[in-house]
Amino acid sequence: MRTFTTMIYRELKRFSRSRARVAGSLINPLIWLVFFGMGWSGVFNNPMAKGVFGGVDYLTYLVPGVFAMTVFNMSFMQGVTIIWDKQFGFLKEILVAPASRAEAILGRITGGSLMALIQGIILLTLSFALADLKLSGVLPALGLGFLVGVAIAGMGVAIALKMTSMEGFQMVVTMIMMPMTFLSGAIYPIDAMPGWMKALAYVNPLTYAVDGTRRYLVGGAIAKFSPAVEWGLLALLALAFSAIAVLEFEKATID
């Protein structure tokens, strides 16, 4: 497992050394909470509106969604580091090294997921000053966050291994991330969506991560799905996308 742990260490070390990347990854979710969440809280500050959001204020409703969005976004961007390493030759060194390719790419995926989870932890810590959250729900929420992080990092890596252009990957990421975010129930309830949007929301893996984190951080009454469905589906997707990424990396060649 030396290759696996080395790749995790590399990802975390590289992230910690990039101050601009650390600052940018934290500022974006805080903008959602402060300018979007606090702004709309004034609009939804009445009993009728609270009924739409499960009986809680809008900011409390939004925080679990922003947490899941943060882990989701940062995990998906793990694919950018793959393309970066392609361009600067580090990926070639991994391919010719006498080490397991599967361990190397799984270490990259796990390291990217942990990096995204650390940002989620920081966001949750700050959010306790803004919203009425349950401290007892932090650990299970982090568990769900890690599963969705592994699943989405695996997806991002698998896509990036097929691409050579940073710009092309960014375009693909935008086309995938934006619809998944708006269909997840992070910003507004799924029940408020038109029928065709609901159907898409139910096949969106981020929906189950948002629902689960909201269950643990806000309350079980606000959740739509059972814990078994949420944990089981996200674990299955984490295994599936990690396996796809491993297969793609095993087929990779040196150009």
Image: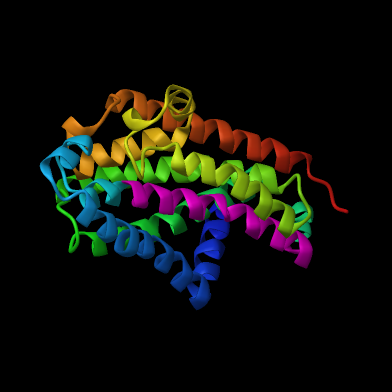
Q: Is residue 239 left or right of residue 210?
A: right
| Location of residue 185 in the rendering, given as x and y in whole percent from the top left corner | 36, 38
User: Closer to the camera, 149 or 182?
Assistant: 182
Q: Which residues are magenta?
A: 65-90
* Placement of the C terminus among the 4 image quadrants: bottom right
User: Closer to the camera, 110 or 130?
Assistant: 130
What is the residue that sits farthest to the left in this orientation?
47
| Residue pictured at 65% horizontal, 39% vertical | 246
**What colouring does the structure picture have?**
rainbow
| Residue pictured at 23% horizontal, 52% vertical | 43
Q: How many marks?
A: 0
Q: Is residue 39 left or right of residue 149?
A: left
User: Closer to the camera, 241 or 173?
Assistant: 173
| Residue pictured at 42% horizontal, 27% vertical | 194
> Magenta: predominant secondary structure element?
helix
Is residue 100 among what the camera can see? no
| Residue pictured at 56% horizontal, 64% vertical | 10
Q: Is residue 172 left or right of residue 191?
A: right
Is residue 61 among what the camera can see? yes
| Location of residue 19 in the rendering, given as x and y in whole percent from the top left corner | 49, 77
| Location of residue 180 in the rendering, given as x and y in whole percent from the top left corner | 50, 40
What is the residue that sits farthest to the right in this orientation?
255
| Location of residue 26 in the rendering, given as x and y in whole percent from the top left corner | 40, 66
Residue 91 covered by magenta stretch:
no
Vertical comparison of 183 with 175: above or below: above
Residue 88 covered by magenta stretch:
yes
User: Closer to the camera, 153 or 183?
Assistant: 183
Vertical comparison of 161 with 185: above or below: below
